[in-house]
Amino acid sequence: MTTAIRIDGKAKAAEMSEKIAADTALLKAEHDLTPGLAVVIIGEDPASQIYVRNKKKRAESCGFYSVQHSLAEDTSQEEILRLIDELNNDASIHGILVQLPLPGHLDEQQITQSISPAKDVDGFHFVNIGKLTSGRTADAFVPCTPAGCMLMIEDHLGADLSGLSAVVVGRSNIVGKPMASLLLQANATVTVTHSRTKDLAGVVRRADIVVAAVGRANMIERDWVKPGAVVIDVGINRIESTVDGETKSRLTGDVDFESVSEVAKAITPVPGGVGPMTIVMLMSNTLRAAR
Ligand code: GUN
């Protein structure tokens, strides 16, 4: 029985963060320029509150100017568009992020498309999506989660994935679709699977690279995974269990870490894998926007 390498996203993110902080100090010293990141959060979603807090903490540790706009659940579309317009025109702000998901009454697409493509550090604007899908990655803002996943894949397989088969589980705009574009650009042979895919386990079993982003706790088990595959787990699922009458909650991914570790070459843990890398890629995009 082999044991997979545990891909330490937290350590890699900390290392990258130090480099970003050093580059930021240089940018300040040489050009009197401080990268500015504005994060907008609407409503009280507890998971979003935690994510936004972590983004702000990381921005500050990188030496950025960081502002947070926390708006009430019932904020109108017009008010949000007005705020984004202000931020688009604010010279101290280089990156704008509106935390998703949004409350149901808001038009997500109109909001994400109202952010200037030059400040769209989430990579959700059609201009950035278009650049990514047409292979102009170098001048696109690439969505942070897939960008972070890609760096971890490269660490284990190199930048050229020629001849390798990659299976992405989940077709979201935030993860699945941009992930597929990045893998394709690195010459992998890419399959995007989703809830309507027939024989999902059989498809995943052919993959040298598995990226799981479905939001179903521990769905991918040992017998779904080809021996020697690199497995990236994007899932963040909260599981409640009652032990001795006490309800406890813990985070788990879309991959059954224990059993898949017995066959994979390398695997990301949850927490401590993709999550910290997503945040550091946001910092990397913001520094680039400032430059
Ligand atoms: N919600 C979950 N992931 C993300 C992300 O990458 N960006 C934003 N803005 N919201 C999210």
Image: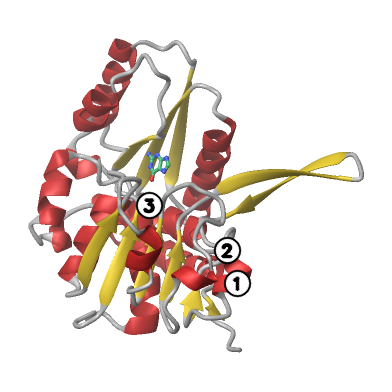
Q: Is residue 246 above or below residue 105?
A: below
- Residue at the spot of label 1: 259
Q: Are marks 2 and 1 in contact (CB under 8 Å)?
A: yes
Badge 3 marks a residue whose secondary structure is helix
Q: Are marks 3 and 1 in contact (CB under 8 Å)?
A: no
Q: Is residue 27 above or below residue 104?
A: below
Where residue 280 sits: x, y (%)? 43, 58
Which residue type carries mark 1?
Answer: Ser
At label 3, counting other C-alpha atoms closer than 10 Å, the crowd grade (few under 14, some 14-19, many 20 or more) is many
Where residue 19 sits: x, y (%)? 42, 69
Where residue 273 sits: x, y (%)? 52, 64
Q: Residue at x 63, y 70 (%)?
A: 258
Viewed as shown, does residue 245 lie left or right of 126?
right
Between the residue at mark 2 and the residue at mark 1, the CA separation in whole angstroms equals 6 Å
Between the residue at mark 2 and the residue at mark 3, the CA separation in whole angstroms equals 28 Å
Q: What is the quadrant of the N terminus in the image?
A: bottom right
Farthest residue to the front: give it.
199
- Label for residue 43? none
Q: Nearer the viewer, residue 3 or 108?
A: 3
Which residue type carries mark 3?
Answer: Leu
- Residue at the spot of label 3: 282
Q: What is the quadrant of the C terminus in the image?
A: bottom left
